[in-house]
């Protein structure tokens, strides 16, 4: 993409309304604009990051055996009356009346709808287990939306729902999602820590939150230092016994506690306990038959008797992750995107757009990068070099390739890795090889 034809409204000044660095950088780097309190428009660069994160989440859900669907954002109040949550959810639910005076709402989560849709399509215990998921906008009328997309009113969530014949099966599904979450955040280049959690308005008796470690995180977490090494996981997610043992082991040895520190866990962990700040980017729940019973979901068991499936639900804050990753990865000059979620892999900078020789060399490298399938944002604008470097640093593209008169004269390109000081002068071929993934 040529910057001369793009839509990248960067800001020089830090906007006064933004209190935390990720919000400031998302506005300055032209990723988002606020359109109403807690509601954001996603601009081209921000949308590319959102899509990258969505893609990683989707790939890991698919790998875990979950099946994608798409539910409507607007739902009927009737559905929510069945579970008793229409009244219980309170003012965070955005209620809407249609032209026929029917009560509707903008979905803050979707346990009721998934349960009902699933109930309409299954008959027998042989239809279990299943995990369905969607990646869809949600709305919660937060009393104090703040920190940009980290606590918005409208936000993008991956929500999955598991259906099993019994509690043991549901625990297995829970563990599969647990492992999928560790893989998901690791694939984004993030260090995520699970924490036992309260269940809040979703309900149930077993829950974990997943926190990304960032110096500016909202919540304090205490975790076993083993978590610093336990970033990737090697376990057979199809082997229920091995999976249960593995997750139990993680929880016994490593799981973090929250600010209400657990003295027993602390004593057991001793000096291995580390303190950090974290941002909640996901939460998973097991709640038994709470929604299946309320929404009349039952299937016929092997003996002909009805079975009420045990369920869990599993959320990831996809739009919150954009902010959380910036909190975890930035410097004074701007964002430092991990490669897996970067909007482009390469920023190509032509230092002298007014010079025919430089422009020919830059156009040529741009064509070669595109031919090699490298996602490149080409700064072909007629601007000062300093302004181009500042923009490239601010928007955080992992690799910068710089074409200037000195290099062109001897056939070289300057290669810089964002976030690392070193610059290298390489031939065009070597530069291409360096940035090709
Ligand atoms: C699990 C999926 C649920 O809603 N029902 C379906 C369950 N869980 S949750 O913890 O309430 O939300 C899941 C994740 O969504 C993100 N999130 C938000 N992101 C931005 N702005 C908000 N206001 C907001 N509220 C929740 C969090 O990452 C959370 O873990």
Image: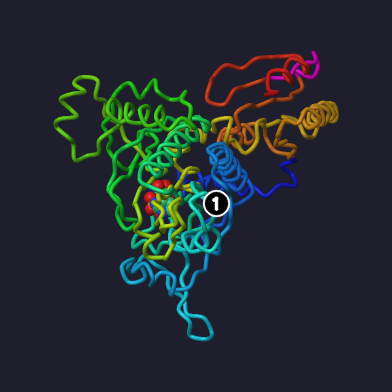
What residue sits 47% from the left and 37% below the top? 325
Residue 338's place in the image compared with 318, above or below, is above
Q: Residue at x 42, y 50 (%)?
A: 313
Q: Tell whether 405 sits left or right of 159.
A: right
Verify whether residue 231 appears in magenta: no
Q: How many marks?
A: 1
Q: Quadrant of the C terminus?
A: top right
**Is 340 above or below relative to 270?**
below
For residue 351, which quarter of the picture? top right
Residue farthest along the front direction in this orientation: 303
Residue at the spot of label 1: 135
Q: Position of residue 89 (x, y in %)?
A: 34, 66
Q: Secondary structure under badge 1?
A: strand
Task: Please tell me which residue lies in front, 437 or 391.
Answer: 437
Q: Which residues are magenta?
A: 406-414
Hey, which quadrant is residue 172 in on the image? top left
Q: Quadrant of residue 176?
A: top left
Residue 291 drawn at (x, y percent): 38, 60
Residue shown at 33% from the left, 21% from the top: 226
Judge left or right: residue 372 versus residue 129: right
User: Residue 198: where, in percent of width, then height?
Assistant: 27, 48
Quadrant of the image containing the N terminus? top right
Name the residue rendered at 57%, 47% in the picture: 67
Magenta span includes 407: yes
The location of residue 423, given as percent across then percent down, is 61, 17
**127 up-or-down from 91: above or below:** above
Q: Is residue 369 left or right of residue 135?
A: right
Neighbour tally class for label 1: few under 14, some 14-19, many 20 plus, Cα within 10 Å: many
Colouring chosen for the image of the structure: rainbow
């Amino acid at each position: 993409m040529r910057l001369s034809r793009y839509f990248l409204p960067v800001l020089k000044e830090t906007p006064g309304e933004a209190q935390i660095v990720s919000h400031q950088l998302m506005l300055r780097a032209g990723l988002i604009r606020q359109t109403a309190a807690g509601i954001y428009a996603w601009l081209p660069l921000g949308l590319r990051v959102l899509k990258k994160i969505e893609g990683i989440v989707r790939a890991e859900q698919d790998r875990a055996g979950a099946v994608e669907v798409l539910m409507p954002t607007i739902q009927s109040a009737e559905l929510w009356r069945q579970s008793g949550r229409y009244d219980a959810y309170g003012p965070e639910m955005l209620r809407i009346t249609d032209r026929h005076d029917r009560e509707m709402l903008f979905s803050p989560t979707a346990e009721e709808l998934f349960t009902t849709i699933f109930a309409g399509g299954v008959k027998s215990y042989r239809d279990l287990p299943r995990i369905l998921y969607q990646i869809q906008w949600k709305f919660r009328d937060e009393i104090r939306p703040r920190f940009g997309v980290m606590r918005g009113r409208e936000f993008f969530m991956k929500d999955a729902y598991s259906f099993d014949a019994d509690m043991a099966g549901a625990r297995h599904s829970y563990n599969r999602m647990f492992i999928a979450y560790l893989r998901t955040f690791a694939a984004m280049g993030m260090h995520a820590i699970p924490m036992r959690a309260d269940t809040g308005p979703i309900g149930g008796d077993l829950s974990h939150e997943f926190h990304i470690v960032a110096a500016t995180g909202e919540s304090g977490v205490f975790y076993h230092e083993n978590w610093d090494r336990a970033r990737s996981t090697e376990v057979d997610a199809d082997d229920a016994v091995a999976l249960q043992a593995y997750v139990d082991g993680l929880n016994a040895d490593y799981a973090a506690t929250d600010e209400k520190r657990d003295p027993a866990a602390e004593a057991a962990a001793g000096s291995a306990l580390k303190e950090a700040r974290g941002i909640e980017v996901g939460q998973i729940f097991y709640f038994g038959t709470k929604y299946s019973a309320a929404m009349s979901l039952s299937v016929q068991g092997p003996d002909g008797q009805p079975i009420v499936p045990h369920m869990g639900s599993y959320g990831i804050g996809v739009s919150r992750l954009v902010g959380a990753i910036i909190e975890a990865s930035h410097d004074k000059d701007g964002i430092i995107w991990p490669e897996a979620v970067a909007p482009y892999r390469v920023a190509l900078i032509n230092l002298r757009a007014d010079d025919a020789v430089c422009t020919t060399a830059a156009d040529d490298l741009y064509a070669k990068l595109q031919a090699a399938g490298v996602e490149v944002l080409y700064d072909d604008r007629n601007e000062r070099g300093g302004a181009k470097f500042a923009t490239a640093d601010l928007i955080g593209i992992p690799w910068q390739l710089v074409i200037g008169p000195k290099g062109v004269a001897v056939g070289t390109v300057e290669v810089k890795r964002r976030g690392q000081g070193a610059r290298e002068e390489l031939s065009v071929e070597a530069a291409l090889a360096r940035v090709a993934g």
